Image (cartoon, grey):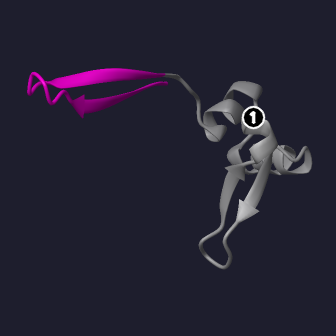
């Protein structure tokens, strides 16, 4: 999926669309590899590509800082 961001150019007063690149979600990655969303998160967690943040009902899988670098 191609992500874009619209910002306001203060010199002209018009909106400008910035291309932020072509990215896929973890769920889309799992579908491309033939596994479901839970399985792909489990595998990425075991490989230490993602970590679980938060607690209770607010748990989120975030990409590990070393993988971002």
Camera-side residue of 47 and 11: 11
Say which quadrant the C terminus sits in: top right
- Tell me if residue 11 is in the magenta stretch: yes
Question: To which quarter of the image does residue 37 belong?
Answer: top right
Residue marked by disc 1: 69
- Is 62 left or right of 25, judged from the image as shown? right
- The residue at the point 68 percent across, 52 percent down is 62
Residue 45, image x and y in percent?
84, 51
What crowding class fits label 1: few (fewer than 14 Cα within 10 Å), some (14-19), or many (20 or more)? few
Helix, strand or loop for the magenta stretch, by majority: strand
Camera-side residue of 45 and 32: 45
Q: Where does the magenta region start and end?
A: 1-20
Question: To which quarter of the image does residue 34 belong?
Answer: top right
- Tell me if residue 15 is in the magenta stretch: yes
Residue 6, image x and y in percent?
27, 30
- Is 24 left or right of 43, judged from the image as shown? left
- Is 31 left or right of 21, judged from the image as shown? right
Camera-side residue of 60 and 31: 60
Answer above or below: position of 30 versus 58: above
Answer above or below: position of 22 versus 34: above
- The residue at the point 74 percent across, 61 percent down is 52
- The residue at the point 81 percent across, 41 percent down is 66
Answer above or below: position of 49 versus 58: above
Secondary structure of the residue carrying numbered label 1: loop
Answer above or below: position of 37 versus 60: above
Camera-side residue of 31 and 10: 10
Residue 28, image x and y in percent?
62, 33
Q: Which residue lies furthest to the right in this view?
A: 46
Residue 14, image x and y in percent?
11, 24
């Amino acid at each position: 999926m191609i992500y874009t961001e619209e910002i306001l150019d203060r010199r002209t007063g018009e909106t400008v669309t910035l291309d932020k690149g072509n990215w896929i979600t973890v769920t889309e990655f799992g579908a491309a590899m033939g596994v479901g969303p839970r399985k792909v998160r489990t595998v990425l967690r075991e490989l230490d590509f993602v970590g679980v943040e938060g607690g209770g009902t607010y748990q989120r899988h975030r990409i590990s800082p070393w993988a971002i670098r």
